[in-house]
Image (spheres, rainbow, N blue to C red):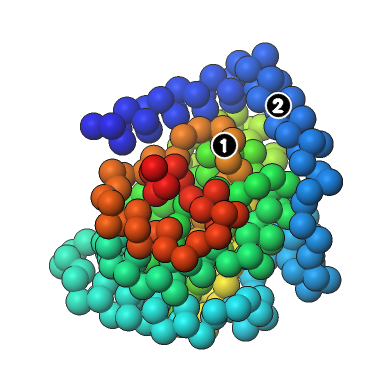
Amino acid sequence: MLDLAVRAGNRVKREVIGRVGPARELSQHLHRQRLRRYEPFVPTLSPQRAEVVATLREEGVCVSTLDRLGLPGTDRLQAGLGALAAATARGATPGSDTSRPSLDDVLAESDVWQWGLQPELLDLAEAHLGLPPRYHGADVRCEHATARTVGVRQWHRDMEDHRMFKILVWLNDVDLEGGPFEWVSRRHTDRLVRELAYVTGFVGDDALRRRVPEDEWRRATGPTWTAVVADTRAVFHRAMPPVRRDRGSVTFTYTSRTPMTTVPVPPVTERQRELASRGLDDRQLACLPRAFTR
């Protein structure tokens, strides 16, 4: 019930900010102020990682690989993801569109959960967001080849914050029939927002096709360990419905610590708090949702 109330409140807030001019201008003004105040503290990145951020700002999506990102702990991350993917497959409900491991299972694989909190990755997220990041965890999932266009398999933008930072990693080879990440350019997205008077929710294939030719829809196919770095507010996107092969993935998500809307967090047990925060330094702890540090 609490989660439903939070979601309903978020929708109202997005509608007000999106459709009421003074509310929208105030939200944007406060965000610009925060960016200006924090600009001297934004981390300096290596040229290779600065290029990732530049591509995000320009295109909204940067398709890479875990190897090219070169982040510490990747070998341990891959081993932990392999174990979680196998457990997810074993526990899949017949006929379901999506399967996930439990939060307990994810937290128990500390090399997966805490990979998203390593300093080099926090620097990358912070450089794009322009503000201290909030880490929303590792979402391990299997999208089953049901071909159904449901949930995040529909076109949408993530509207939790002014900027978003996500890294999606493929846990198996993904081709056009295996449910790749699909998006349209920032240029098309900006036009669509105006033409559709878009604030929140899903957009159908036909509505999108009438405004953006399908040959301009972009797809992030690739082998296992392909990494899709995306600002999922900046572009209309979806998980393309898999039709022949399941798609395993993990998504690491970041917003600022002053998002536009509340990101729901399910009730957390003391054991989960312990696993989520074990061995973290002050900066890492500050990035966790408050439910994990109370």
Q: Secondary structure at mark 1?
A: loop
Q: Residues within 10 Å of mark 2 (few under 14, many from 20)?
A: few
Which is nearer the eye, 230 or 127?
Answer: 127
Q: Position of residue 47 (x, y in %)?
A: 83, 71
Q: Position of residue 95 (x, y in %)?
A: 18, 64
Residue 178 occupies quadrant: bottom left
Q: Position of residue 27 (x, y in %)?
A: 66, 25
Q: Position of residue 76 (x, y in %)?
A: 47, 82
Give the distance between the C-alpha atoms of the residues marked 2 and 1, in whole angstroms.
11 Å
Query: Residue at (60%, 54%) from the top-left corner?
Result: 283
Query: Residue at (55%, 60%) from the top-left corner?
Result: 281
Query: Residue at (63%, 60%) from the top-left corner?
Result: 122
Q: How many marks?
A: 2
For this view, does 55 lie left or right of residue 294? right
To which residue does mark 1 refer? Answer: 259
To which residue does mark 2 refer? Answer: 30
Query: Residue at (32%, 69%) from the top-left corner?
Result: 108
**Quarter occupied by the C terminus:** top left
Q: Can residue 157 be seen in this snapshot?
A: no
142 lies above or below 245: above
Q: Residues within 10 Å of mark 1 (few under 14, many from 20)?
A: some
Q: Amino acid at mark 1?
A: Pro
Q: Amino acid at mark 2?
A: Leu
For this view, does 150 lie left or right of residue 158? left
* Furthest residue toward left: 94
Q: Are marks 2 and 1 in contact (CB under 8 Å)?
A: no
Which is nearer the eye, 292 or 210?
Answer: 292
Residue 35 occupies quadrant: top right
**Quarter occupied by the N terminus:** top left
258 lies above or below 81: above
For this view, does 160 lie left or right of residue 35? left
